[in-house]
Protein backbone atom coordinates (compact mmCIF):
# COMPACT_ATOMS: atom_id res chain seq x y z
CA UNK A 1 0.00 0.00 0.00
CA UNK A 2 2.34 2.78 -1.16
CA UNK A 3 1.83 6.01 0.77
CA UNK A 4 4.03 9.07 1.09
CA UNK A 5 6.83 7.13 2.79
CA UNK A 6 6.91 4.36 0.20
CA UNK A 7 6.90 6.80 -2.71
CA UNK A 8 9.79 8.66 -1.11
CA UNK A 9 11.65 5.34 -0.93
CA UNK A 10 10.91 4.81 -4.61
CA UNK A 11 12.16 8.30 -5.42
CA UNK A 12 15.42 7.69 -3.62
CA UNK A 13 15.82 4.31 -5.31
CA UNK A 14 15.46 6.03 -8.70
CA UNK A 15 18.37 8.43 -8.07
CA UNK A 16 20.88 6.13 -9.85
CA UNK A 17 19.07 6.66 -13.16
CA UNK A 18 19.62 10.44 -13.06
CA UNK A 19 21.98 11.33 -15.89
CA UNK A 20 21.06 8.29 -17.95
CA UNK A 21 19.52 8.53 -21.39
CA UNK A 22 16.43 6.56 -22.40
CA UNK A 23 17.04 3.98 -25.13
CA UNK A 24 13.57 2.48 -25.39
CA UNK A 25 10.19 2.44 -23.63
CA UNK A 26 7.90 -0.51 -22.96
CA UNK A 27 4.25 0.49 -22.50
CA UNK A 28 2.29 -2.75 -23.01
CA UNK A 29 -0.77 -1.72 -20.99
CA UNK A 30 -2.86 1.07 -22.51
CA UNK A 31 -4.95 1.27 -19.33
CA UNK A 32 -1.85 2.32 -17.40
CA UNK A 33 -1.32 5.44 -19.52
CA UNK A 34 -3.39 8.32 -18.17
CA UNK A 35 -4.52 11.76 -19.30
CA UNK A 36 -5.17 10.70 -22.88
CA UNK A 37 -1.62 9.38 -23.24
CA UNK A 38 -1.06 6.59 -25.75
CA UNK A 39 1.73 4.06 -26.17
CA UNK A 40 2.64 5.50 -29.57
CA UNK A 41 3.31 8.88 -27.97
CA UNK A 42 5.53 7.68 -25.11
CA UNK A 43 7.52 5.41 -27.41
CA UNK A 44 8.06 8.35 -29.76
CA UNK A 45 8.73 11.13 -27.23
CA UNK A 46 10.83 9.47 -24.52
CA UNK A 47 13.63 7.63 -26.35
CA UNK A 48 16.66 9.92 -26.42
CA UNK A 49 15.71 12.06 -23.41
CA UNK A 50 17.99 12.20 -20.37
CA UNK A 51 16.76 11.84 -16.80
CA UNK A 52 17.71 15.07 -15.03
CA UNK A 53 16.20 14.62 -11.57
CA UNK A 54 13.61 13.02 -9.33
CA UNK A 55 10.82 14.52 -7.25
CA UNK A 56 7.75 13.71 -5.22
CA UNK A 57 4.54 15.46 -4.26
CA UNK A 58 2.43 13.33 -1.94
CA UNK A 59 2.02 9.94 -3.60
CA UNK A 60 3.06 11.23 -7.02
CA UNK A 61 6.63 10.44 -8.04
CA UNK A 62 8.24 12.63 -10.68
CA UNK A 63 11.00 11.77 -13.13
CA UNK A 64 12.31 14.99 -14.61
CA UNK A 65 13.95 14.88 -18.04
CA UNK A 66 15.31 17.29 -20.60
CA UNK A 67 11.97 16.72 -22.30
CA UNK A 68 8.63 16.06 -20.60
CA UNK A 69 8.28 15.23 -16.91
CA UNK A 70 7.01 11.75 -16.11
CA UNK A 71 4.44 11.37 -13.34
CA UNK A 72 4.35 7.90 -11.82
CA UNK A 73 1.48 6.76 -9.58
CA UNK A 74 1.61 3.39 -7.87
CA UNK A 75 -1.95 2.88 -6.63
CA UNK A 76 -2.28 0.25 -3.90
CA UNK A 77 0.03 -2.46 -5.21
CA UNK A 78 2.58 -0.78 -7.46
CA UNK A 79 6.29 -1.50 -6.96
CA UNK A 80 9.34 0.16 -8.50
CA UNK A 81 12.12 -2.03 -9.87
CA UNK A 82 15.40 -0.21 -10.61
CA UNK A 83 18.18 -2.05 -12.43
CA UNK A 84 16.51 -5.34 -11.54
CA UNK A 85 16.21 -4.61 -7.80
CA UNK A 86 12.93 -3.85 -6.03
CA UNK A 87 12.96 -0.53 -4.19
CA UNK A 88 10.88 -2.25 -1.49
CA UNK A 89 11.23 -5.97 -0.90
CA UNK A 90 8.03 -6.17 1.13
CA UNK A 91 4.91 -4.15 0.30
CA UNK A 92 2.06 -4.30 2.84
CA UNK A 93 -1.22 -5.59 1.36
CA UNK A 94 0.42 -6.07 -2.05
CA UNK A 95 1.98 -9.04 -3.77
CA UNK A 96 5.77 -9.20 -3.58
CA UNK A 97 6.04 -11.84 -6.28
CA UNK A 98 8.40 -11.02 -9.13
CA UNK A 99 6.03 -11.64 -12.00
CA UNK A 100 7.06 -9.84 -15.22
CA UNK A 101 3.47 -10.20 -16.46
CA UNK A 102 2.66 -7.39 -14.04
CA UNK A 103 5.16 -4.98 -15.61
CA UNK A 104 3.05 -2.05 -16.82
CA UNK A 105 5.71 0.47 -17.85
CA UNK A 106 9.48 0.37 -18.29
CA UNK A 107 12.36 2.62 -19.31
CA UNK A 108 15.54 1.04 -20.66
CA UNK A 109 18.71 3.12 -20.76
CA UNK A 110 21.43 3.41 -23.37
CA UNK A 111 24.20 2.51 -20.91
CA UNK A 112 22.28 -0.43 -19.45
CA UNK A 113 19.82 -0.77 -16.62
CA UNK A 114 16.11 -0.11 -16.38
CA UNK A 115 13.28 1.40 -14.37
CA UNK A 116 10.14 -0.74 -14.22
CA UNK A 117 6.69 -0.24 -12.68
CA UNK A 118 5.26 -3.59 -11.56
CA UNK A 119 1.61 -3.43 -10.52
CA UNK A 120 -0.55 -6.58 -10.23
CA UNK A 121 -3.84 -4.71 -9.70
CA UNK A 122 -3.19 -1.99 -12.32
CA UNK A 123 -4.29 0.80 -9.97
CA UNK A 124 -1.35 3.08 -10.71
CA UNK A 125 -0.54 4.96 -13.88
CA UNK A 126 1.86 7.06 -15.94
CA UNK A 127 1.37 10.62 -17.18
CA UNK A 128 3.48 13.11 -19.09
CA UNK A 129 3.75 16.58 -17.55
CA UNK A 130 1.20 15.84 -14.79
CA UNK A 131 -0.86 18.71 -13.42
CA UNK A 132 0.56 19.02 -9.91
CA UNK A 133 -1.69 22.00 -9.14
CA UNK A 134 -4.48 19.48 -8.53
CA UNK A 135 -2.66 18.26 -5.42
CA UNK A 136 -2.71 19.86 -2.00
CA UNK A 137 0.46 20.65 -0.05
CA UNK A 138 2.67 17.69 0.80
CA UNK A 139 1.80 16.20 4.19
CA UNK A 140 5.45 16.03 5.20
CA UNK A 141 5.95 19.77 4.91
CA UNK A 142 2.53 21.46 5.27
CA UNK A 143 2.64 24.15 7.96
CA UNK A 144 0.05 24.71 10.65
CA UNK A 145 -1.82 27.67 9.14
CA UNK A 146 -2.81 26.03 5.83
CA UNK A 147 -3.42 22.75 7.67
CA UNK A 148 -5.88 24.54 9.94
CA UNK A 149 -7.68 25.99 6.90
CA UNK A 150 -7.87 22.57 5.25
CA UNK A 151 -9.84 21.23 8.21
CA UNK A 152 -11.91 24.34 8.95
CA UNK A 153 -13.48 24.48 5.49
CA UNK A 154 -15.07 21.02 5.50
CA UNK A 155 -17.68 19.12 7.49
CA UNK A 156 -16.55 15.80 5.98
CA UNK A 157 -15.32 13.11 8.38
CA UNK A 158 -11.84 14.01 9.54
CA UNK A 159 -10.19 10.95 8.07
CA UNK A 160 -11.82 11.52 4.68
CA UNK A 161 -10.55 15.11 4.65
CA UNK A 162 -7.01 14.03 5.52
CA UNK A 163 -7.04 11.47 2.70
CA UNK A 164 -8.31 13.93 0.08
CA UNK A 165 -5.20 14.33 -2.05
CA UNK A 166 -6.51 17.58 -3.49
CA UNK A 167 -6.41 19.07 0.02
CA UNK A 168 -3.30 17.46 1.52
CA UNK A 169 -1.11 15.11 -0.49
CA UNK A 170 0.54 11.90 0.61
CA UNK A 171 -1.51 10.49 3.48
CA UNK A 172 -3.05 7.06 3.02
CA UNK A 173 -5.07 4.69 5.15
CA UNK A 174 -2.26 3.54 7.46
CA UNK A 175 -0.65 6.92 8.08
CA UNK A 176 -3.97 8.58 8.84
CA UNK A 177 -5.12 5.87 11.26
CA UNK A 178 -1.74 5.93 13.03
CA UNK A 179 -1.67 9.74 13.26
CA UNK A 180 -5.20 9.94 14.66
CA UNK A 181 -4.45 7.10 17.08
CA UNK A 182 -1.43 9.01 18.37
CA UNK A 183 -3.32 12.32 18.54
CA UNK A 184 -6.28 10.77 20.35
CA UNK A 185 -8.87 12.07 17.87
CA UNK A 186 -11.75 10.13 16.32
CA UNK A 187 -11.61 9.69 12.52
CA UNK A 188 -15.39 10.13 12.35
CA UNK A 189 -15.59 13.66 13.70
CA UNK A 190 -16.41 16.42 11.21
CA UNK A 191 -13.18 18.06 10.16
CA UNK A 192 -14.43 21.53 11.06
CA UNK A 193 -15.33 20.40 14.60
CA UNK A 194 -11.69 20.02 15.63
CA UNK A 195 -10.72 22.59 18.26
CA UNK A 196 -7.65 24.81 17.66
CA UNK A 197 -5.59 22.94 20.25
CA UNK A 198 -6.57 19.61 18.67
CA UNK A 199 -5.61 20.89 15.21
CA UNK A 200 -2.15 21.79 16.50
CA UNK A 201 -1.88 18.41 18.23
CA UNK A 202 -2.92 16.55 15.07
CA UNK A 203 -0.52 18.57 12.93
CA UNK A 204 2.35 17.59 15.24
CA UNK A 205 1.17 13.99 15.28
CA UNK A 206 1.18 13.73 11.49
CA UNK A 207 4.67 15.22 11.19
CA UNK A 208 6.02 13.00 14.00
CA UNK A 209 4.32 9.90 12.58
CA UNK A 210 5.86 10.48 9.16
CA UNK A 211 9.30 10.98 10.71
CA UNK A 212 9.10 8.00 13.07
CA UNK A 213 7.64 5.51 10.58
CA UNK A 214 10.04 6.73 7.94
CA UNK A 215 12.95 5.77 10.20
CA UNK A 216 11.34 2.42 10.95
CA UNK A 217 10.89 1.59 7.29
CA UNK A 218 7.41 2.45 6.09
CA UNK A 219 3.74 3.20 6.65
CA UNK A 220 3.11 -0.34 7.90
CA UNK A 221 5.42 0.04 10.94
CA UNK A 222 3.03 2.02 13.15
CA UNK A 223 2.22 1.19 16.76
CA UNK A 224 -1.41 0.54 15.76
CA UNK A 225 -0.59 -1.76 12.85
CA UNK A 226 -0.34 -5.11 14.73
CA UNK A 227 -3.83 -4.52 16.15
CA UNK A 228 -5.46 -3.81 12.78
CA UNK A 229 -7.39 -7.11 12.85
CA UNK A 230 -10.95 -7.97 13.86
CA UNK A 231 -11.07 -7.97 17.64
CA UNK A 232 -7.73 -6.19 17.91
CA UNK A 233 -6.98 -4.36 21.15
CA UNK A 234 -5.73 -0.79 21.45
CA UNK A 235 -1.96 -0.85 22.12
CA UNK A 236 -2.40 2.18 24.39
CA UNK A 237 -5.24 1.20 26.75
CA UNK A 238 -6.34 -2.33 25.84
CA UNK A 239 -9.82 -1.32 24.64
CA UNK A 240 -11.18 -3.33 21.72
CA UNK A 241 -10.72 -1.31 18.55
CA UNK A 242 -13.64 -0.28 16.41
CA UNK A 243 -13.54 -1.36 12.78
CA UNK A 244 -15.60 1.02 10.67
CA UNK A 245 -15.60 2.50 7.19
CA UNK A 246 -14.68 6.16 6.86
CA UNK A 247 -14.22 7.84 3.51
CA UNK A 248 -14.62 4.47 1.82
CA UNK A 249 -11.66 2.96 3.69
CA UNK A 250 -11.52 0.35 6.44
CA UNK A 251 -10.64 2.21 9.62
CA UNK A 252 -9.39 1.03 13.00
CA UNK A 253 -9.63 3.33 16.00
CA UNK A 254 -10.00 3.28 19.77
CA UNK A 255 -13.34 4.52 21.17
CA UNK A 256 -11.77 4.96 24.60
CA UNK A 257 -8.99 7.47 23.96
CA UNK A 258 -9.91 8.80 20.49
CA UNK A 259 -12.67 11.31 21.17
Image: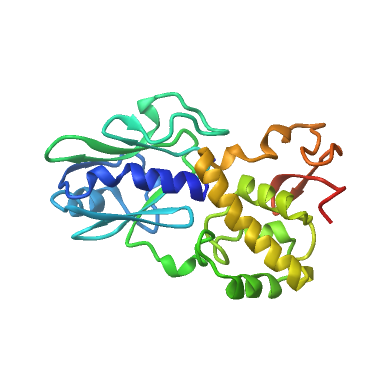
Q: Position of 104 compared to 121: left or right?
A: left
Please identify the quadrant where the N terminus is shown: top right
Give the colouring mode of the picture.
rainbow
The answer to whether residue 81 is above or below residue 150 is above
The structure residue drawn at horizontal position 48% and vertical position 53%, both measured from the top left corner, is: 59
Q: Residue 217: horizontal and vertical position, in percent?
A: 50, 38
Q: Tell me how many marks there are.
A: 0
Q: Nearer the viewer, residue 108 or 59?
A: 59
Q: Residue 178: horizontal and vertical position, in percent?
A: 67, 47
The structure residue drawn at horizontal position 12% and vertical position 40%, both measured from the top left corner, is: 110
Residue 74 shows up from this direction: no
The answer to whether residue 100 is above or below residue 130 is above
Q: Nearer the viewer, residue 165 or 46?
A: 165
The structure residue drawn at horizontal position 51% and vertical position 59%, both measured from the top left corner, is: 140
Q: Position of 66 compared to 237: left or right?
A: left
The answer to whether residue 36 is above or below residue 77 is below
Please identify the quadrant where the C terminus is shown: bottom right
The structure residue drawn at horizontal position 84% and vertical position 36%, both measured from the top left corner, is: 238
In which image quadrant can residue 201 be found? bottom right
In which image quadrant can residue 247 be found? bottom right
Q: Residue 21: horizontal and vertical position, in percent?
A: 15, 47
Residue 232 shows up from this direction: yes
In which image quadrant can residue 86 be found? top left
Q: Residue 121: horizontal and vertical position, in percent?
A: 50, 36
Q: Position of 200 compared to 107: left or right?
A: right
Amino acid sequence: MPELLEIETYRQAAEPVVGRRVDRVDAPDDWYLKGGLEAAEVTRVLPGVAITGTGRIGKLMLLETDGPTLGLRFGMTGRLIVNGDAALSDLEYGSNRDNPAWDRFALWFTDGGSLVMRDPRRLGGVELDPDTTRLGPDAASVTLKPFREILATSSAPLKARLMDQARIAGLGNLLVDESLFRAGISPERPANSIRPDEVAQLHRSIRQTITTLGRRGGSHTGDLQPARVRGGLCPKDGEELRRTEVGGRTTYWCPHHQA
